[in-house]
Every structure is written in structure tokens, then in C-alpha cells.
Image (tube, rainbow, N blue to C red):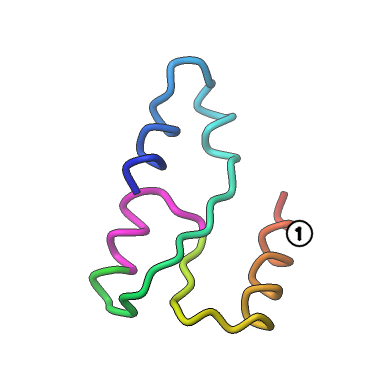
Amino acid sequence: MEKRRHERSDPWQTKADAAEIPILAMTAQASTESIHQCELAGMNECIFKPVNAKELIELLQDIVEKI
């Protein structure tokens, strides 16, 4: 999440560039707090371990369609 915060504040990127970088968070903790932390860090989506391949593919397709 720290990396995501850094990308949003990188002086070499415009705010528009940084906002358009789609990032998917992957966490082992499927809790409301984990989801909230991902949202605060600016993640576009959040997926939980163990990862279901079909769910991951669908999520990635959704992200790509939004680009």
C-alpha cells in the first residue's frame, strides 16, 4: 500500500497519470479493515487469498475494460 501512496504523489507523474494506473490489491486478510485500507491507499480493486483464478480473470477484465 505504501507503494501505491508513493505512485499517487510521484512528482514525475501528473495527477491524471497517477490516477489512471490501475492497481489490484491482493491480501490474505478478508476483513472490512483490509478493504478500507486498500481504498484509502487508492487501490482500484481488492482480491483475497487464496485467489480463485476465475475471479481474478474476471476482475482483471473489468479493470482493462475501464481503461
Q: Residue at x 34, y 68 (%)?
A: 35
Magenta includes 29? no
Q: Residue at x 70, y 73 (%)?
A: 57
Tell me residue 65's x, y (percent).
76, 59
**Image height check: is 64 above or below 35?**
above
Tell me residue 39's x, y (percent).
36, 58
Q: Nearer the viewer, residue 58 or 50?
A: 50
**Image height check: is 4 above or below 15?**
below
Q: Nearer the viewer, residue 11 or 54?
A: 54
Q: Nearer the viewer, residue 35 or 30?
A: 30
**Image height check: is 59 above or below 44?**
below
Furthest-top residue in view? Answer: 12
Q: Is residue 49 left or right of residue 63?
A: left
Magenta segment, which residues? 35-44
Q: Is residue 18 left or right of residue 39?
A: right
Q: Residue at x 60, y 40 (%)?
A: 20
Amino acid at dot 1: Glu
**Magenta: predominant secondary structure element?**
helix
Q: Is residue 54 left or right of residue 6?
A: right
Tell me residue 12's x, y (percent).
50, 15
Asked which secondary structure carries label 1, the reply is helix
Q: Which residue is mark 1?
A: 65
Q: Is residue 30 left or right of residue 55?
A: left
**Crowd band around label 1 with a 10 angstrom C-alpha radius: few (<14), some (14–19), many (20+):** few
Magenta includes 38? yes
